[in-house]
Amino acid sequence: MTEKLGRRQFVQGMGALGMLAASEALRANDNATAVRWPKLAGSPVLDSLHPVIEHARDVHTHLERLQEIAGWMAYEELPMPDYALPLGAGEGKPDETIDFILTSDVVDTAFTDFSTHEKFQVDYAGRHWSDSDALFACMKRALDNGIPVLDGKFLARVTRPELERIFAGNIELPMLDQKMEVLHQVGGVLAETYEGRFHNFVKSCSPRLYDNGNGLIDRLVKEFPRFNDVSEYDGHTIRFYKLSQLGVWFVYSSLRKTGQFPLEDLNKMTAFADYMVPVTLRLLGITSYSPELEQAINTHQMVPRDSRREVEIRAHCIYATALLCEEINNIRPKDMQIVIPQIDARLWTHYHTTWWPHHLTKTIMY
Amino acid sequence: MNRSRRQVLKGVSTLGAIAAMGAEPLLAANPVKSPVSSGSLPWPKPIGSPVIESLRPVIEGSRDVKTHYDKIVDAARWMAYEELPMPHMAVPYGLDKNPDVAIDFIMVSNTINSAFTDFKTHIKFQTDYADARLSDSDAMVACLKRAMDNGIPILDGKFLAKVSRPEMEKLFAGNMEMPMLDEKMAVFHQAGEVLAAKYDGRYVNFVKSCPPRLYDNGNGLVDRLVKEFPRFNDVSQFDGHQVKFYKLAQLGYWGMYSGLGRTSGFKLEDPQKLSAFADYIVPVALRLMGMTSYSPALEKAINSYQMIPRDSRQEIEIRAHSLYATALLAEEVNRLRPADQQVIIPQIDARIWTHYHTTFWPHHLTKTIMY
């Protein structure tokens, strides 16, 4: 941590030097160390990205374009979302809301069959549900049928036939075996330490994302390996923490108005490194890809988990959204400042149904 | 009507999702052809809109507003891949259960759908109805529904033709007097008389007497609305040319089409002839995104809240460029979208309006009943 902070300060110093002196020395160095870094500090996710942003080969972030877009996006409303669970799940019961969201979050990945490209879909309560929404509908359906899907003791031993019934839909839920495995793992921890329920875990944490190891994210990724969404890059550990941050963000935006889920360091939350936000950034021209990567994505080739390219795509997504948020806040008045997930929501909402291809990676991490 | 426009984002269609599942992606690798141009001025392909066709003298002779075609092409390159759903605009208060009543309600409220902010105090008109506090046009719509609940025949032209000022004050009781109340009473009188004399007092009878087309050799829905009801004849003179905007006329039919289209309560064969709705907000969005720019003098006038008089050169240029730029943008966006996902201009209008209608960036101020 100290080492990384020192490095960032060094980088900023170089930037200032470049502005004061003639910048030829920097310009000559193509692999410029003068990478601009968001001011936000204290997010272990953002802080871990330096090696990727400084050495990326296939993905680039374009600061001028980013500033141009901030120049108009700043004047949009960019609301703080209020998330409502489908079909009234957890309504008026904060503990149940926490259990429902975080338990679903454990398996909230991979809804498209990797061979047929068919999406997982379910009909329930007179409505049609697709992707992640279909997962939530399955969880609600199970609860309505008296299956204790929010109870770690049940999840720790759930069988494949039981899961097939819980997630009955148009196709088998993709990666069902891997999902069973993470449910066993998470259920075991919940049963053993938290009386089977995520809300007991949440109450045992400090009301912060990060707090010297006792924050919600600190402990989610430590106690539940399933959430430890990290990759190695040139010998450095790069943190993404997509599902842990997203789960906590969902809980926060569901309970925000009730005041039952205070979060003192919301500003340390980054974007959720998924498939869609990188597409948006690429289409807006905030990022660009090498011709090889562009072609790989556009021809639906798999980009392997933990590959250099996958790490670069995700790291630039978090880096660029952090900078975009900062530029936008520089323009907006004090009482209309935003946090990064509001930008994430803005970028995701418009493009999550786009037909422009996104990268394809087989993983349970997002 | 604005209430419905705000709900645009909620009307997410599943078309995009289905296309994303199956269709081959359109990679826009082909060089883009430039649009039909006259001299150096890009001009959108004709869509049969007398509004768009009337703009040429303004676009060619503008002094204070410019459209930047390169920025439009640039914006289309990302906007084309957004969903841009066809909005399901909700007819307020469930009135769509009876399409005839819905048409009457939409048209009566559209008749006075302008100016809800006091020009001196900058306070917005608000009212309480059904346990909610409503603002702007939502508040006006609530006032009309409240009157209906109280048995006041607000949809009847015979009533509107003779509504008195004290009655108007009672109808629109709120946090302050409704701005431009006298002007709103005058348009009620005028429209009410026409309705009473020719259409048995009902807008729905007028609508049913037209072919299901906006424009039809002078007999279409817009053609006749602006001719028979001068209140909707939203035109201005510019260098001796008549420039047509038809903001409220087009918006009213768009509201019916997207609110009632699925129930077959309202048929419209040529929605692709709609232009954008020349209001206060769409010009702001275009200006912020750099698709238009203003002269320093106009920029300063707007940013210091000076009034831009109705029918002034500046007002006409602002409105004309907002229709021109959105028409070009829709065309560029369609160039990049597959055949089954083509958009019409009001979808672009909705996309732009939704994002900026609450913006803190100043918009131009004009005292008018036309928008």
Image (cartoon, coloured by chain):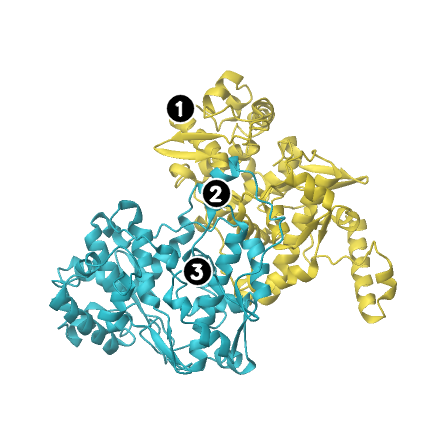
Q: Residues within 10 Å of mark 3 (few under 14, many from 20)?
A: many
Is residue A333 rendered to the left or right of residue B166? right
- Res. B370 in view: yes
- Chain displayed in yellow: A
Residue that numbered label 3 is attached to: B349
The residue tagged 1 is A146
Q: Circle 3 — which element?
A: helix
Between tags 1 and 2, which lies in front? 2
Q: Residues within 10 Å of mark 1 (few under 14, many from 20)?
A: few
Q: CA distance from mark 1 to mark 3?
A: 47 Å
- Foreground tag (1 vs 3): 3
> Cβ–Cβ below 8 Å for labels 1 and 2?
no
Q: What secondary structure is found at the residue carrying circle 1?
A: loop
Q: Which chain is cyan?
A: B
> Is residue B143 among the parts visible in the rendering?
no
How far, Cα to Cα, is label 2 from label 3? 19 Å
What residue is at 22 percent from the left and 73 percent from the top? B187
Please give the name of the residue rendered at 48% of the width and 58% of the height, measured from the top-left corner: B330
Q: Which residue is mark 2?
A: B16
